[in-house]
Image (cartoon, rainbow, N blue to C red):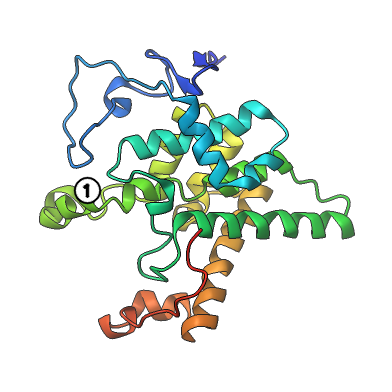
Amino acid sequence: MVREPARDLATGGIRPGDPWTSPASMHHRRDPRSSSVNGQEEPDMEVDGGAIDAVLSALPEADEIQDPELRRRVGSAFVLGLRESSFSSIHDVPGEYDLDPSVNLVAHTRVVTAMATAAADAMQARFPDVKVDRDTLIAGSLLHDVGKIYEYDRLRAATWRDGRARTGYPPIRHPIYGAHLAMAAGLPEAVVHIVASHAAEGTRVRRSLEATLVATLDHISWELLLTARRGLTIDDVRSGTPRIRSLPPRKSGGSA
């Protein structure tokens, strides 16, 4: 039997000694460019309630989560990511550099969450046997790209570009770092699964119903934007020439 990790519900984080993570993997990096670990420093996972409130106010879809503890842990995951990055706000985090740099993380996250809940409602209205856990779906939708706070950090990216033969590029993609943040915030395994499996990494696992919704609608949201704004597909952009990648999108409704 696996022992339940020691949780600090007041902070929405984990306490030192939590068996899900090691001090090395969870230590608080003040400088996002640093990959060094001070073995004598205990992990500082306390999360300020005001910071959580600020995140949740930017993501009003979180109000639809019925479980208040789950809602707070969603905000906590974003706060943990932000404080280990050079970003001061989730509004500053890009949604996707290559596909449409005018769309920030908040705008993309809210669209995917709205699409996922609408799709789930439509399916359940027609097919009552399709059972979707709505709290899990909303939490996973809101968090699916939380790891981009790490992957798209400009200071980290500069270090990676200069030493990609040593570090890889990027060393850790956003689904993996996002799963790390979700676990650090004490989110349920079903939510962590959505975050970890929503992109290419998910092709190696069997996705849950909620994870299938998020992964599919995440892709569709970008495909629709590219078609409407640039007449391109995701494959066009990711396999295209630098000229195609640099085509500017229209300046309209790109951020939230």
At 61% from the left and 33% from the top, the residue drawn is 71
Compared with 79, 141 (above or below) is below
Where does residue 86 sit, x and y in percent of width and height?
A: 27, 44
Q: Residue 72 sits in which quadrant?
A: top right
Indicate the quadrant containing the N terminus: top left, top right, bottom left or bottom right. top right
Secondary structure of residue under mark 1: helix
Q: Nearer the viewer, residue 185 or 50?
A: 50
- Identify which residue, 140 or 46, lies in the foreground: 46
User: Camera-side residue: 237 or 211?
Assistant: 237
Q: Residue at x 41, y 71 (%)?
A: 99
Q: Is residue 76 visible?
A: no
85 in relation to 7, above or below = below
At label 1, which amino acid type do we have? Answer: Arg
User: Percent x, y for residue 124?
Assistant: 84, 54
Residue 110 found in image quarter: bottom right
Dot 1 corresponds to which residue? Answer: 156
